[in-house]
Image (tube, rainbow, N blue to C red):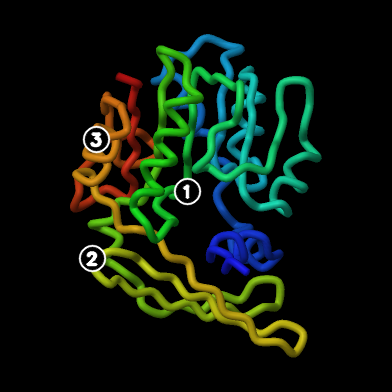
Amino acid sequence: MEKSEWFEEWFNTPFYHILYQNRNEEEAAVFIGKLMDVLDIEKPAKVLDLACGKGRHAITLNKLGYNVTGSDLSVNSIAQAKKFENDTLRFIVQDMRKPLKNEKFDAILNLFTSFGYFDDKADNLKVLNACGEMLNKKGVLVIDFMNAIKAAANLAEKETKIIDGIQFEITRQFDGRHIFKTISFGHMGQFHSFTERVQALTLDDFEELLKVGGFTLKKKYGDYELSAFDEKTSDRLILIAAKK
């Protein structure tokens, strides 16, 4: 039996959503508004929110007037997102390494560090190839990733969070290629531990990946206000790319 990937297990648990429930929804909505202004895509363009989780960005995009599809590998996340479906908003379970058949989009958004989860870097190219296949001729790809250089240099090695009565013990480490985040906690007499592993991809890494994947990097930003990117000070690495 093939072993599950870490993200298949962790993202499908209720504890993942408990730990990350306090994400800033207002910040996310402002970011999406600014981003779509920069992309300047006419409504009701077709947009894919790739690795959409429970759909917070997809829902915001739909409210702005776009025809939105959200896809994610987590069955539980998609089940939650489906509660918000309407005529121009739908959610489906899908591996981001595989294209949606007979689907074309004007924009594909991959947000909140939802890239680089795989151990094999070839899988990164599979994601980009799938995106290229799904994009219209003038379509754009947006990748919102952590600024790995700053993140690795400023790791909070230990942290404790108490949320909904659960005490999460969090440790982080960097092995030169990946950033690991281990979340350990007890619940109803049982001990749980999950480890997130994300490739520490830099701007240089993405430029090479995009080039090989058939994309041209058009713009880059360093935060959700869309400020200029600086590898030492920026919190995010937000890339806008177009098919060659």
Looking at the rendered structure, which numbered label has been put on residue 232?
none
Q: What amino acid is found at the position of numbered circle 1 in the picture?
A: Ser
Q: Residue furthest bottom?
A: 189
The disc, 2 or 3, on the residue closer to the chain's N-terminal end is 2
Q: Tell me if mark 1 has few (under 14), some (14-19) or many (20+) residues whose alpha carbon lies within 10 angstroms of its own.
A: some
Residue 32 drawn above or below residue 8: above
Disc 3 is placed on an element classified as: loop
Relative image position of residue 28 (x, y in whole percent): 53, 40
Q: Residue furthest top?
A: 42
Question: Residue at 18% across / 53% down in the picture?
Answer: 232
Residue at mark 1: 114
Residue 53 drawn above or below residue 168: above
Confirm or deny contact between disc 2 and disc 1 (CB under 8 A). no
Q: In this rendering, would 61 be left or right of 209?
A: right
Looking at the rendered structure, which numbered label has been put on residue 153?
2
The disc, 3 or 1, on the residue closer to the chain's N-terminal end is 1
Q: What amino acid is found at the position of numbered circle 3 in the picture?
A: Ala
Residue at mark 3: 228
Q: 239 and 198: which one is in front? A: 198
Relative image position of residue 164 (x, y in whole percent): 71, 71
Disc 2 from disc 1: Cα separation: 20 Å
Disc 3 from disc 1: Cα separation: 21 Å
The disc, 2 or 1, on the residue closer to the chain's N-terminal end is 1
